[in-house]
Image (cartoon, coloured by chain):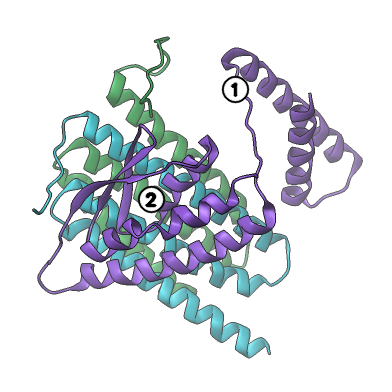
Chain colours: A cyan, B purple, C green
């Protein structure tokens, strides 16, 4: 049982790390600010979620898990707010999104 | 006043969860700081005249979150595929989706859910419409099909 | 296994820093710094588990809070050139 939990938690940590790196690559590769915003949200949602989930599985039903859940919930509420504020400020600052068609 | 009491209860619960200690001194300190935060919050409410109103059906909210997590995972995989494609094939677009039939809280939830799903970012709310920037065409099509707003309308009280 | 996670986050931190230096607009830099902050939260949590001291989570929690507030403050500063000016609120405020 413990082995199974460990295995799942390692899978979560590894795939979380993969998504985090993918978001970082996207942040560097994408052509303009608005597309980079999407890349950053990959790390902020699934990357963070999987890594914190992996840590939660390591500590089981304890106070540390409660704190991890709090971090996760807070990030899930604040990161879209920050992204929206950024997009709106950029639009306000006369940054023209690169749009196909 | 009801607002202050519920805020106090939440803060006290948070204090106990975060500290995990039950010595008298620490509990007293917790009560003092929770009361102080309540006092500050009440003062701020009196200044800007806004009271947070949370009025949703909790069970359905849980179901909505489960659905949202599923959508986020799917969207993440799509966007990651775009990022790792050897040559970029993006088709960014800007369009508006209607947000009628939603309360103020519902509109905020809608805009936040749109932003939380990778591939779409809400950039403005105007005249009960949300302006969205989408990274790839499938993500834009998904949103315009209106599944998310239908589910949010079901969360509205009565 | 924590090492793999820490390595992934460190690599991403380097990539975000590169974006923060390259710009080109100020919004790109703010986005990169905000993203960097999220990664800092992750690395604090991972490092806490790596060294067997989950107390680090408190720091991670506080860092998440401060990172968000910092981003909003910097944005507001660039929008209005001021943080606390009293001005009539407009219908399409952030």
- Using the image as rendered, state which of residue C13 and residue B128 is in the foreground: B128
C65 sits to left or right of C90: right
B153 sits to left or right of B13: left
Q: Are marks 1 and 2 on the same chain?
A: yes
The answer to whether C1 is drawn above or below residue C51 in the figure is below
The quarter holding residue B44 reads: top right
Task: Residue at the far right: name it.
Answer: B24
- Let me know if residue B95 appears in the view: yes
Q: CA distance from mark 1 to mark 2?
A: 25 Å
Dot 2: within a 10 Å radius of its alpha carbon, few (fewer than 14), some, or many (20 or more) residues? many
Query: What residue appears at the point 28 percent right and 61 percent down from the top-left corner?
Result: B141
The quarter holding residue C83 reads: top left
Query: What residue appears at the point 54 percent right and 39 percent down from the top-left corner?
Result: B105
The answer to whether B100 is drawn above or below residue B87 in the figure is above
Q: Callout 1: helix, strand or loop?
A: loop
* Chain for disc number 1: B
Image marks 1 and 2: residues in contact by CB distance under 8 Å? no
Q: Callout 2: helix, strand or loop?
A: helix
The quarter holding residue A68 reads: bottom right
Residue B50: assigned label = 1
A70 sits to left or right of B103: right
* Chain for disc number 2: B
Query: What residue appears at the point 37 percent right and 25 percent down from the top-left corner?
Result: C93
Residue of label 2: B115
Q: Position of residue C69 (x, y in %)?
A: 46, 35
Q: Which of the image's four quarters has the N terminus of chain A?
A: bottom right
- Let me know if residue C60 appears in the view: no
Query: What residue appears at the point 28 percent right and 32 percent down from the top-left corner?
Result: A89
Q: Position of residue B25 (x, y in %)?
A: 87, 37
Question: Which numbered disc flags the more N-terminal residue, 1 or 2?
Answer: 1
């Amino acid at each position: 049982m413990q082995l199974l939990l460990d295995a799942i938690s390692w899978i979560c940590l590894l795939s979380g790390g993969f998504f985090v790196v993918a978001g970082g690559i996207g942040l560097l590769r994408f052509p303009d600010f608005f597309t980079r915003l999407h890349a950053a949200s990959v790390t902020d949602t699934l990357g963070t979620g999987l890594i914190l989930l992996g840590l939660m599985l390591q500590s089981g039903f304890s106070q540390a898990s409660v704190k991890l859940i709090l971090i996760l919930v807070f990030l899930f509420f604040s990161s879209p707010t920050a992204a929206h504020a950024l997009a709106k400020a950029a639009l306000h600052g006369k940054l023209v999104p690169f749009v196909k068609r | 006043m009801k607002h202050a009491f519920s805020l106090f209860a939440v803060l006290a619960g948070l204090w106990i969860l975060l500290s995990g200690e039950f010595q008298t001194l620490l509990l007293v300190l917790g009560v003092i700081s929770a009361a102080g935060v309540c006092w500050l919050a009440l003062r701020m409410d009196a200044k800007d005249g806004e009271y947070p109103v949370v009025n949703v059906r909790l069970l359905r909210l849980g179901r909505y979150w489960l659905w949202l997590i599923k959508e986020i995972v799917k969207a993440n995989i799509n966007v990651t595929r775009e990022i790792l494609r050897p040559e970029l094939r993006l088709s960014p677009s800007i369009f508006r989706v209607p947000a009628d039939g939603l309360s103020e809280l519902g509109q905020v939830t809608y805009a936040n859910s749109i932003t939380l799903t990778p591939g779409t970012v809400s950039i403005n709310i105007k005249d009960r419409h949300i302006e969205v920037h989408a990274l790839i065409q499938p993500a834009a099509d998904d949103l315009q099909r209106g599944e998310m707003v239908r589910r949010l309308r079901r969360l509205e009280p009565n | 296994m924590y090492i793999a996670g820490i390595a992934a986050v460190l690599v991403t931190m380097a990539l975000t820093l590169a974006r923060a230096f390259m710009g080109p607009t100020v919004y790109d830099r703010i986005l990169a710094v905000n993203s960097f902050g999220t990664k800092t939260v992750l690395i604090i949590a991972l490092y806490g588990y790596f060294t067997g001291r989950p107390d680090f989570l408190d720091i991670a929690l506080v860092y998440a809070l401060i990172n968000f507030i910092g981003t909003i403050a910097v944005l507001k500063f660039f929008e209005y050139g001021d943080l606390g000016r009293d001005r009539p609120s407009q219908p399409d405020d952030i």
